[in-house]
Image: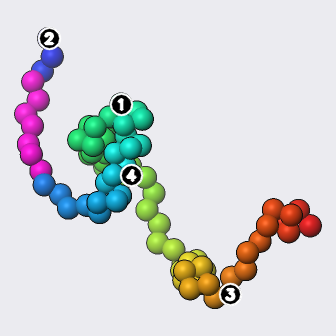
Amino acid sequence: MLAVQEKSRTNIYVDVKMKDQAKEIFNQYGLSLSQAVNIFLTQSVLNRGLPFDVKIPNDETLQAMKDVETGENYEDVTLEDLKK
């Protein structure tokens, strides 16, 4: 016999585009957004924290990210360039 689980409705605010993209991915696994969020919550409890590493980029990485966004100190590199 299955135990009945009490459920609670929760409202969260998320980026619309990110939500739509995530729903497409979850759909490929046959999961609804609600089921995916419940998996995340379950894994957070089991891990006693976030179920993945969260890292803060160092100064060099932050500068490289800014450079890519602005196009500064950045040059296109082809696969052929890398082979040389």
Q: Quadrant of residue 64?
A: bottom right
Secondary structure category for the residue under label 1: loop
Residue 63 visible within the image: no
* Residue displayed at 14% across by 11% down: 1
N-terminal of the pair, mark 2 or mark 1, is 2
Q: Looking at the rendered structure, which numbered label has been put on residue 70? A: none
Marks 3/2: CA distance? 63 Å
Q: Disc 4 designates what residue?
A: 21
* Residue displayed at 62% across by 84% down: 71
Q: Quadrant of residue 50?
A: bottom left
Q: Is 39 located above or below residue 64 in the figure?
A: above
Q: Residues within 10 Å of mark 1 (few under 14, many from 20)?
A: few
N-terminal of the pair, mark 4 or mark 1, is 4
Q: Quadrant of the C terminus?
A: bottom right
Q: Disc 2 designates what residue?
A: 1
Do residues under tags 4 and 2 come within 8 Å of each other at their CB atoms?
no
Secondary structure category for the residue under label 3: loop
Q: Amino acid at mark 1?
A: Gly
Secondary structure category for the residue under label 4: helix
Secondary structure category for the residue under label 2: loop
Viewer-proximal residue among 36 and 45: 36
Q: Disc 1 designates what residue?
A: 30
Start and end of the magenta stretch?
4-10
> Does the segment drawn in magenta span residue 13?
no
Q: Main secondary structure of the magenta part?
A: loop
Q: Amino acid at mark 3?
A: Asn
